[in-house]
Amino acid sequence: MATSFRPRGADDLGLRRALSDRLLPLLVASMVFLAALALAGAVAAAGLARHWQGGAAALVTIQVPQPDMPAATGQGATRAEAIEAVLKADASLAARRLGTDELSVILRPWLGDEVTRLSLALPAVFEVKLAAASSGDLAAKLAQLAPGTLVEQNGVWLGRLGVLAASLQASAALALVVVAVVATAVVAIATRAGLAARRDAIEIVHGLGATDRMIARQFSGRVTLLVFVGALLGLVFAIPLLLGLARLTAPFQPGLPQAGPTADLLDALPPVLWALLPALPVAAAAIAWLTTQSTVRSWLAGLP
Amino acid sequence: MVRLDGVGLRYGGGPFVLQDLNFALQAGSFRWLLGPSGAGKTSLLRLLTLAARPSVGALNVLGVQVDRAKRRELPPLRRQIGMVFQDFRLLPHLSAFDNVALPLRLAGRPEGQVRADVGELLRWVGLSKRVAARPAALSGGEQQRVAIARAVIGRPALLLADEPTGNLDEAQAERLMQLLAELNRLGTTVVVATHNEALVQRYPSPSLLLDEGRLTLSSVAEEG
């Protein structure tokens, strides 16, 4: 059985006129642009979730305000020294005081690179790993030594951030699904418009013995080409924007290099995103092929 | 070749446009299909070209029981049937050559054979210098010859024509009839629907006369 009724590149049904090479690619480009943003959002949310959940649930952050003031019950020791002594004396936990450099890194996203020059009095910060998840007793004990000491159980906000990250991922996934559904609808509408415009030609070749497969293949070939070109266009516009966003959010993105004039473009986005972005035009082309085949064959089923 | 037993046709839920048709056509025969406008000639040709299926009755075309056949069985059968329309029904965006080549390409013939056969046939119908012209650039007579060439390029076993001379002057009509007669002599079964009584008298052959969807006269019913 013949599978094609024209030499390569032929256009027996006149689809080059019936299926515009402007509107459909532009619509698809817009959708792929949005899909690329949604995909980047999903990948970023997943990265943040992994980073946030990487720490132990029993991790506690202790902030001691006015660390150089004398402790309430110490013997001449400062509040920070008294707290550190208590923490190190407890064998059920592992404590570490963060250095100035570490504090600078933490504060850099909010205060910039000049943290060390600030006249602002910074608290002493301890990172503590508890054997048990509860920090209630420890908080009371430290408050006696240095009133105003904050004991933050990371597990609580880690849980909340986990929910937030999951919500962001779900929203991004939903956005991708919506884009795919809209893309399917756009392709179906364009195909139906093409079928209506070429009804006479289709009936003629159908009457001459063309199979459904032959006719559907001509439509699929044309529509898939237009969609693929449109998807590439959308990707070309999306990538610079993603690179710009990556630079802006670099301080919040674990594992990625900080923004700078020498930052390598390829390193600016997560490798998984570089792997997934090229899949968008392929996925768009697959949707176009399947939708066109389905639409055309369904329409042809109305012919004898 | 062709056999109809109690065939009726209606479009959608409308009235029957063809009713209780019973006749058979032998291979290599020539038949006129006559009747007033609205008698059902075009509908009968639609049945014979498989553009419609009978609503009732049994239709056998070239050995295939069309009323019971699956859709996928019909395209190969359509390639054995040639059809000439009054309005030519050429594809306007294709050249004369590509219009004529279409049936061969649908059948998956090698491109070399397509070029040779189409070139020869276009020479035969006197259009060897118009192969690249699109239908809009051809006269009515030239378009009809392209349509004829497309209908016969696949050497169909059954050739049907619906008012083929309707848009032609007398000389072109005469030339077309000679062409159809020649094809019939070569073994093709030909059915021609027409209002042109003068043409029927010049080429006397058995007739099928339709009136209000019924066969009122058939000199070929006994052939089956």
Image (cartoon, helix red, strand yellow):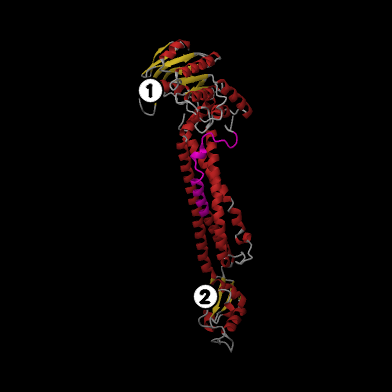
Q: CA distance from mark 2 to mark 1?
A: 92 Å
For the residue labelled by badge 2, is the local secondary structure a helix, a strand or a loop?
helix
Q: Amino acid at mark 2?
A: Gly
Q: Position of residue B84 (x, y in %)?
A: 48, 23
Pick the residue in front: B174 or B63.
B174
Q: Position of residue A40 (x, y in %)?
A: 55, 58
* Image mark 2: chain: A
Q: Position of residue B114 (x, y in %)?
A: 60, 27
User: Which residue corresponds to the image point at 64% horizontal and 62% vertical from the top-left?
Assistant: A264
User: Which residue corresponds to the image point at 55% horizontal and 29% vertical from the top-left?
Assistant: B102
Relative to A69, is B8 on the left or the right? Answer: left
Q: Amino acid at mark 1?
A: Val
For the residue labelled by badge 1, is the local secondary structure a helix, a strand or a loop?
strand
User: Which residue corresponds to the image point at 63% horizontal and 64% vertical from the top-left?
Assistant: A263
* Image mark 1: chain: B
Task: Characterize the local packing of mark 2: few (<14), some (14-19) or many (20 or more) Cα atoms within 10 angstroms.
Answer: few
Q: Is residue A240 magenta?
A: no
Q: Is residue A196 above or below residue B194?
A: below
Pick the residue in front: A199 or B164.
B164
Instruction: Give the labeled residue for mark 2.
Output: A136
Relative to A24, is B108 on the left or the right? Answer: right
Q: Is residue A272 above or below residue A161?
A: above
Pick the residue in front: A94 or B110.
B110
Instruction: Give the labeled residue for mark 1.
Output: B17
Q: Quadrant of the N terminus of chain A?
A: top right
Q: Closer to us: mark 2 or mark 1?
A: 1
Residues in magenta, as a range: A7-34
